[in-house]
Image (tube, coloured by chain):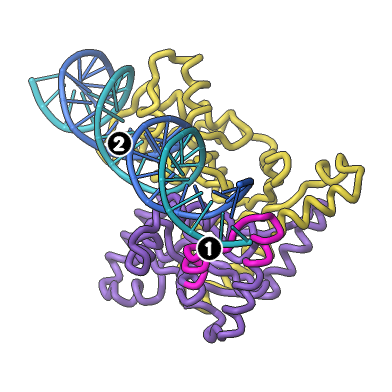
Chain colours: A yellow, B purple, C blue, D cyan
DNA sequence: ATCCATGCAAATGTTTTGCATCTAG
DNA sequence: CTAGATGCAAAACATTTGCATGGAT
């Protein structure tokens, strides 16, 4: 569901190089697990939570621990390669930040699907709001919760949908 | 820091009436603690986390438990009187929704201050995005993280600020 | 009287941390 | 070699839940 449909080999190399510099600059070490985790995220098209990521990585390196996954994700977030967000749930989700492109989310309250979108005019508007408050923006999180097209269509019984929406509203 | 600077007595009565109807409609009971909690939130100007709320309420009713605070907040959110949000932290914050007015947040990464803002054009833009995806929006969460004016001013040493920003960026 | 509300403590689920051991530089 | 990385299990934290008791209707 990524907006950038094609993630090239160069992208991966560039990201890895950035992480490597980041680590070296702080006297941290370049390890196989750090490489493994970043490579996995780079080929992943969607966001993922820490536990699923841990499970997936165990298939490739049975010994990797939850602690290492969390510690590495934290480094990647600090490095700016990964974005951490919460979709109104009790756990965080992680996803690769491609270049400096940013996208926001429409989250279906019914099927939990996440639709990504990007609108330059929205970004501009945000900048103008920040200027007004003399606020220096670093990053943002914009999530719209509602009902997606498919879930609405599935609900052929319009009365049920109306009920559902009024239940959700209050 | 609320946009609505004046919360009238009528507002409070209206909110309480709404909660009362909500409870009665579901066969739930109108209790002193539920009233206490809502009244406390209504007079509060800022958002608050569950634990601080619990501490504050204990001053008024020593017996109130954490569980009751969470259970009541949950009811208020369902009722539409309270909004629950997470400012990139590990715990949720709660605040009264005044009428159907909505506001978004600028969050200072330095002093943790939260500035509220409302822009009709931004809301309109969101609606048009939803239309494009045939998505029915119910509510949204929009947070911009950065450095507030005061923290920037405090940092009279511009070199430090530059360092800080580049550190935050990656 | 009935059924819901509440306090309490235990359980849950996620994320963090201390420590002994292992490994990259 | 030496500082940092890792696995493991325990700890920390916010939040939820089960159950016996208390309270609203």
Q: Is disc 2 surrounded by few (<14), some (14 to 19) or many (20+) residues within 10 Å? A: few
- Residue B31's disc is 1
Give SS at disc 1.
Answer: loop
**Which x, y percent locates residue A69?**
41, 29
Crowd rating for badge 1 (residues with CA inside 10 Å; few <14, some 14–19, many 20+): few
Which residue in the protein does label 2 denote?
A: A24
Q: Nearer the viewer, mark 1 or mark 2?
A: 1
Number of labels in the image equals 2
Q: Residue at x 63, y 67 (%)?
A: B20
> Residue at the spot x=33%, y=77% of the render?
B153
Q: Write the start and end of the magenta stretch as one range.
A: B20-39
Q: Is B112 drawn above or below residue A74 in the view shown?
A: below
At 78% across and 47% down in the image, what residue appears? Answer: A148
Image-based side of C10 in relation to D4, left or right: right
Q: Tell me the element at label 2.
A: helix
Q: Main secondary structure of the magenta part?
A: helix
Determine whether A35 is above or below A83 in the image: above
Q: Nearer the viewer, residue A138 or A47?
A: A47
């Amino acid at each position: 569901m990524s907006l950038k449909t094609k993630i090239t080999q160069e992208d991966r190399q560039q990201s890895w190089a950035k992480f490597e510099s980041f680590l070296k600059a702080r006297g941290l070490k370049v390890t196989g697990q750090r490489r493994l985790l970043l490579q996995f995220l780079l080929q992943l098209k969607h966001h993922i939570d820490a536990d699923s990521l841990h499970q997936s990585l165990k298939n490739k390196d049975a010994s990797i621990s939850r602690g290492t996954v969390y510690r590495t994700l934290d480094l990647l977030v600090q490095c700016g390669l990964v974005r951490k967000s919460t979709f109104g749930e009790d756990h965080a989700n992680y996803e690769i930040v491609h270049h400096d492109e940013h996208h926001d989310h429409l989250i279906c309250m019914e099927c939990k699907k996440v639709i990504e979108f990007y609108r330059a005019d929205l970004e501009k508007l945000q900048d103008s709001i920040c200027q007004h408050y003399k606020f220096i923006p670093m990053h943002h999180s914009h999530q719209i919760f509602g009902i997606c097209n498919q879930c609405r269509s599935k609900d052929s019984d319009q009365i049920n949908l109306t009920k559902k929406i009024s239940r959700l509203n209050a």
